[in-house]
Amino acid sequence: MGQAQGQPARSARCIALVGPYLSGKTTLLESILARTGAIKRQGTTAAHNTVGDASEEARHHGMSVELNVATIDFLGDSFTFLDCPGSIEFQADAANALTACDAAVVVCEPDEKKVPALQLILKQLEDRGIPHFLFLNKIDKAEARVRDIVPMLQPASTKPLVLRQIPIWENDIVTGFIDLALERAHVYREHAPSEVIEIPAALSEREKEARFSMLEKLADYDDELMEQLLEDVPPPRDKVFDDLSKELREGQICPVLLGSAENGNGILRLLKALRHEAPFVQTTAERLGVEGASSCAYVLKTFHTAHGGKLSLARVLAGTFADGATIHSNDDEERIAGVLSLMGQEPVKRGPAEPADTVAFGRLDGINTGATLSTEKGAGLDLERAAINEPVFGLAIAAKEKKDEVKLTAALAKIIEEDPSLSITHNQDMGEMVLWGQGEMHLRVALERLVRKYGIDASTRPRQIPYKETIRKSAEVRGRHKKQSGGHGQFGDVVVTIGPLPRGQGFEFSDKITGGVVPKNYIPSVEIGVRDYLHSGPLGFPVVDVGVCLIDGSYHSVDSSDMAFRQAGRIAMSEGMPQCQPVLLEPIMAVEIAVPSEATAKINSIVSSHRGQILGFDARPGWPGWDVVQANIPEAEIQTLIVELRSATAGVGTFHAKPDHLAELTGKAADQVLAHRGAKAA
């Protein structure tokens, strides 16, 4: 494929490495760096000496927990690779980074259990129109033949998986591959490029069969190629490569390449495919609708560094961005304090960023991940930000030392800037701050970063549940406040009826006073006193769904006052409510659980074990092989739901929950809540 029209000869490309957890993305990046001479020796994740996953958290947990960045030069072309975390808990980085990438390499294993996780990633790429290759990693450890592996993986993709290579096996060891487009065999060489050999006679028929299958899939989108196949006319090699490139760019196919990142096998073939077939920035700008812009960059990721301050990793789609330039994003205006390249976590100063470059801009303090930048004021550019999954796991968080309280809030703000899938809520009623994220590990890593980067040790505990209480029966009660302490006394006397209201009615106050037994100007004070009490009822929780009617009372022409009647109202409630058979109410959430269909039966038992009620289930729209389960589950039981859900679905299940109603809680569960409340009060 030649250069795109109007494209500079050395136009840089930005490629995302995505894939399921532990599929080998960071190892692939390391292998690419070693093969292209960007590093002298290939490190391993086990030895903690890779360019990617250099943070303490990544190395401690043995997994990527944030984006890794590295740029290489390959045959005169520049490629910036963005190695994205595979765990579903850390996929916000991938969602943001993919926006302005030219293409993605989806790294996967020949493992059927990983198909649902693969589907999550492929669907995002398909929905967003991002061209992508599949790199079938760890081919040397495959227990099945490739002819069986590709059909096994196909359900994860709505686009045809087009096999581009077949492996050469000798004594159950992969020793090389046959390139189906080039019709050329290669044998692997340790720490060296593969060597071209004659296609082994034993594989000649298999090669022809696999090549014909590849051409058939390409011909589905090319009538001319279809005619050539029907007439047994061998298509020209250039024609095959043109179709591979065109159908990749147009999102009609997903090419499949083979290799072993750990052994450095298949890496150069992958790089050559990217070099010849991955789109350039011009195509990416068109996809994003900014092809006519004279200046545009998109912020892929935010980093807060110990010495360099805030860095905004950005892809330049149009124009030049230089050190000292003023940039605009909606109403924000900032000045670039340094243009840098990133290699892993190491920033290196460089010259101005040109179209297609992926660079870090220094100290854009008012700019966040997902922002669209321009050097022109009023450019009106605002690319759509990636959708971030709703949080599914929350913990109450507080500084262990009081002196760190203000610092904790500021540090959390920076951590959330780096990872927008984290969030904070302040619950005034509960008097607690809750850190929300995508799972248990997600929050654990955030807490570790707090300690390492900001020196703040925070304590966490399960968040409090907003229980309420109501009553089951009515009562009539008098509340009298009488106090004489020299001079004017205090006198207020009321009679009220207290009764239950239908669920969801809240609180209603009325009066049936006749004859002025309680002067009209004091009635609002009675209501205030009643409302004062409702903040904490006989069980210690806010009171809801209660109606109070003022029916009688008396006053003193000198000693009565607003304050006296407010106190009388409160006294009436405190004496009457315990007589009304108070009962605890717990919040029930409407929960929508999305899981692969084979896990749906497990979800029924998980919901039941969380005191939930299944309302029904249906096929998940737009997700072949997935179901959506509708259920009502108490909020108190949702706290650990995501942990069990992920365990039952190989890490891919998720849910959405919203408040639905309040339900009575009795028996042992209620006793435990009240005992906990009592212990806390004590």
Image: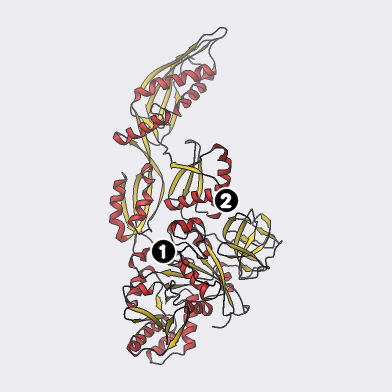
Q: Position of residue 678 (x, y in %)?
A: 39, 29
SS at mark 1 in the image: loop
Q: Is residue 313 above or below residue 467?
A: below
Q: Earlier in the sequence, mark 2 or mark 1?
A: 1
| The quadrant where residue 107 appears | bottom left
In the displayed structure image, the side of residue 50 where residue 77 appears, left or right? right
- What is the total number of numbered labels drawn onto the structure image? 2
Circle on res. 414 = 2
Q: Position of residue 187 (x, y in %)?
A: 42, 83
In the displayed structure image, the side of residue 65 where residue 362 appears, left or right? right
Dot 2, crowdedness within 10 Å: few (<14), some or many (≥20)? some
Front residue of 204 and 465:
204
Which residue is most to the top?
486
Q: Is residue 324 above or below residue 177?
A: above
Question: The C terminus is located in which quarter?
Answer: top left
Q: For the residue marked with disc 2, what is the amino acid?
A: Lys
Residue drawn at x 43%, y 53% as measured from the top left: 441
Question: The N terminus is located in which quarter?
Answer: bottom right
In the displayed structure image, the side of residue 446 where residue 137 appears, left or right? left
Q: How is the image coloured?
A: secondary structure
Residue 182: in sight, yes or no?
no
The Cα atoms of the two marked residues, 2 and 1, are separated by: 28 Å
Q: Position of residue 9 (x, y in %)?
A: 62, 79
Residue 645: in sight, yes or no?
yes
Please name the residue that numbered disc 1 is placed on.
22
Q: For the residue marked with disc 1, what is the amino acid?
A: Leu
Residue drawn at x 69%, y 63% as measured from the top left: 375
Dot 1, crowdedness within 10 Å: few (<14), some or many (≥20)? some
